[in-house]
């Protein structure tokens, strides 16, 4: 009888967890959908006014691409 009660309790907990998970998933999905819709409307109004996307300033200045030294002498002078 005791093992039957434990099995029933586990099934009830499993079902409760599944129900809670489904509820939380739906709430999160509604929240994400709402934010996406709001952002879409914002973008539509900006583009209808002839404005583009908001341009953010660069975080760091651009750097020259890395170039490996060609000769042994250049490699030696680089580390002095």
Image: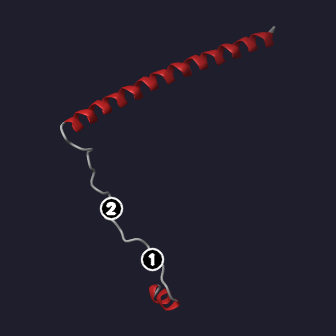
Residue count near mark 1 (Cα–Cα under 10 Å), binned few <14, some 14–19, many ≥20: few
Is residue 43 left or right of 16 when viewed as pictured? Answer: left
- Measure how far apart labels 1 and 2 are at the Cα level: 20 Å
Query: Which one is in front, 76 or 40?
Result: 40
Q: How is the image coloured?
A: secondary structure
Q: Secondary structure at mark 2?
A: loop
Q: Tell me the residue at 37%/31% (across/down).
A: 36
Quadrant containing the N terminus is: top right
- Residue on which disc 2 sits: 60
- Residue on which disc 1 sits: 67
Q: Secondary structure at mark 1?
A: loop
Q: How far across and down, in percent of the image, does residue 35 sit?
A: 35, 30
Q: How far across and down, in percent of the image, does residue 17 sit?
A: 60, 20
Q: Residue furthest left?
A: 49
Above-or-below relation of 53 to 18:
below
Above-or-below relation of 74 to 60:
below
Q: How far across and down, in percent of the image, does residue 47 sit?
A: 23, 38
Give the mark count: 2
């Amino acid at each position: 009888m005791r093992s039957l009660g434990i099995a029933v309790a586990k099934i009830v907990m499993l079902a409760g967890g599944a129900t809670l998970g489904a509820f939380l998933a739906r709430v999160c999905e509604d929240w994400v959908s709402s934010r996406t819709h709001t952002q879409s409307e914002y973008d539509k109004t900006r583009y209808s006014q002839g404005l583009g996307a908001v341009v953010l300033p660069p975080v760091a200045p651009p750097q020259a691409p890395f170039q490996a030294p060609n000769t042994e002498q250049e490699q030696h002078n680089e580390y002095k």
